[in-house]
Amino acid sequence: MEKVKPTVIGSYPTVIDNMDLMNLYFNQEDFSWDKYIKSAVEDMIESGIEMISDGQTRDPFVNIFTRRLKGCRIRDRTEIIDKIQYNGPITIDDQKYVRSIIPKDIQLIGLITGPYTLMKSSVDLFYKNEDNIAYDFAYALKNEIQILQSYVDMISIDEPYFSMGIPEYGKDLIQILTNEIRCPTRLHVCGDISKIIPDLLDMPVDTLSHEFKASPKLFDVFKHYDITKNICLGCVQSDNVRIESVGEIIEHIKKGIDVFNDKITQIAPDCGQRMLPRDVAFQKLKNLVNAGEEIYGC
């Protein structure tokens, strides 16, 4: 049986020093995110998380990609003003930096915001066709993933908009991203996914990740399906400052085991933790790790 790893979904809280920004602006120097990335990484490792992310500190999860892609500009939202194309590495330098500061036994997740979510989060001023936008985002992201896989242990694709309904071409989009990728892949879809579970189980990824803590009814829905994917079990809420106790998390994991048995390979927060206070996010991770140790010895 594969070892169950405590992990994260993506973002982690960070507080930007505004004086840093002002000084760099007036001195016309480039802003370095390294200390903020390091702070997030150190928190995750200190809490006991074994498969970390870079904390996605640089930008919100849509802007971090659209800011660097040709054809996009950011005002209040991302606006698509020309054909979407890859314009060079987006998250690679941050992953290289994280690799340089973490112990060798800590694994790293490469985070990709999915093409359907990027499309749905953007204002179209060019294409006039949602399908074409989503496909061009997919082909652009594919270039990033092909580079990224050399620096990470897993690629995690975040597609929250799938919970509103997966388009007919949804599987195609994910296939573009994961085809010929060497490292393991994970698809994270938050929200109520009860009506799209068959489509999710058919996705070309190794692991499915969902917010089982905020939506415990999903356990009852999944019982009716043959589980063919590994499962990343959401165990603590990411939109609630209440800190779940170790005992509460243990009981939640046991419910997951009743449904998924040894298909659970990761335990994690429900979603990214960006909106939580840092001390709350840290304690949730620490309690998650302690609960995992009680059950799995992980």
Image (tube, rainbow, N blue to C red):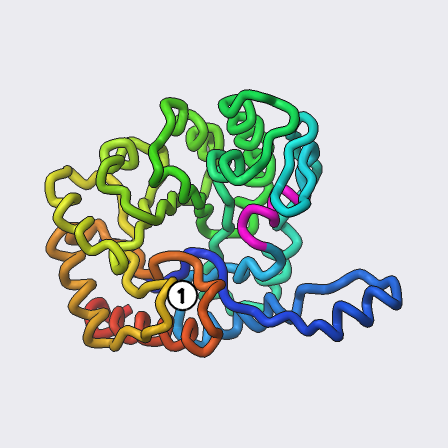
10 above or below 194? below
Residue at x-position 67% and y-position 44%? 74
* Image position, residue 141 (x, y; %): 56, 36
* Image position, residue 108 (x, y; %): 48, 57
What's under tag 1, amino acid-wise? Glu
* Image position, residue 231 (x, y; %): 27, 49
Front-most of residues 8 and 3: 8
268 above or below 220? below
Residue 64 drawn in magenta: yes
- Identify the residue at the far front of this view: 76
Left or right side of 182 for 217? left
Residue at x-position 66% and y-position 66%? 34
Residue interval drawn in magenta: 60-67
Left or right side of 81 for 57? left
44 above or below 197? below
- Which structural element holds mark 1? loop
Residue at x-position 30% and y-position 60%? 267
Q: Which quadrant is the N terminus positioned in?
A: bottom left
* Image position, residue 185 (x, y; %): 41, 43
- The residue to which callout 1 is attached is 50
Q: Quadrant of residue 54?
A: bottom right
Left or right side of 8 for 121? right
Residue 116 drawn in magenta: no
Left or right side of 231 for 285? right
Q: Say how many tags the image has.
A: 1
Front-most of residues 78 and 178: 78
Q: Which quadrant is the C terminus positioned in?
A: bottom left
Front-most of residues 142 and 28: 28
Residue at x-position 21% and y-position 74%? 294
Label 1, residues with CA under 10 Å away: few <14, some 14-19, many ≥20: many
